[in-house]
Image (cartoon, rainbow, N blue to C red):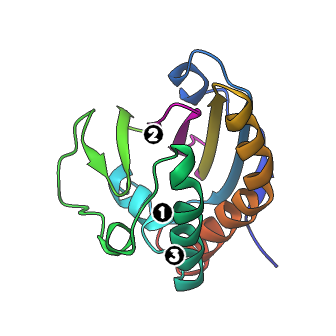
Amino acid sequence: MSDVVRCELPAESRLAESLPRVAYVDSFAAPARIPGQDMVAIYAAALGHMPEAFKRLIVLRSQLVKPFGIRGVSREDLAQPIDISRDYAVGDRIGRWTLFARHDDELITGADDRHLDFRVSVLRTPDRRIVLSTAVMPHNAFGRAYLTAILPFHRFGVASLLRNASAAGRF
């Protein structure tokens, strides 16, 4: 049985404020088991341990969407570990994405391109949950079509990353 559940975006999250408008948002939560863990370590625990099959799919997706102006990632990008000892500042890259906001209880990263902007939040709630949320703002018809096509894979992937991190006791 999984301890990862789909949930509403927590009221204390600043994710919705990170984009001018949000067309899509989802959130998944798991219990936090390591008290006082640093947010960069939690972020790395959730997003820094991608299964090999996911990496292959993301590289394939990157190759397929590159001609349409959507920034992709390479195998080398995905192989870079997140340095949990580094003091990241807003504007730095943390893993594959840019750090847009850093708080004691939440990190918000993401990327912008001509078709859509997205943000990813990793939040530690007062009731000791780790909530991984995504917000997306498409800019045009292609961005909306891409979002529609990718959502089933996104939901499965995000839930799996959180489930794997929780099961491994990384947060």
Side of 162 relative to 93 (left or right)? right
- Element assignment for label 2: strand
Residue 79 placed where, x, y %?
Answer: 34, 75
Mark positioned earlier in the residue sequence (2 or 1) = 1
Circle 2 packing at 10 Å, graded few (<14), some (14-19), many (20+), is: some
**In the image, farthest residue toward the left:** 86
Distance from the alpha carbon under mark 2 to that under mark 3: 18 Å
Residue located beneath label 2 in the image = 111
Pick whichever, 140 or 76, lies toward us: 140
Residue located beneath label 1 in the image = 47
Pointer 1 with pointer 3, Cβ within 8 A: no
Residue type at the position of mark 3: Lys
Circle 3 packing at 10 Å, graded few (<14), some (14-19), many (20+), is: some
Distance from the alpha carbon under mark 2 to that under mark 1: 15 Å
In this view of the protein, can residue 159 be seen by the observer? yes
For the point 60% across and 68% down, the residue is 161
- Element assignment for label 1: helix
| Magenta segment boundaries in residue numbering | 108-129
Q: Quadrant of residue 107?
A: top left
Mark positioned earlier in the residue sequence (1 or 3) = 1
Residue located beneath label 3 in the image = 55
Instruction: Kindly report which numbered mark, 1 or 3, lies closer to the viewer in this rendering.
Output: 3
Residue 108 placed where, x, y %?
Answer: 45, 38
Q: Is residue 9 above or below residue 60?
A: above
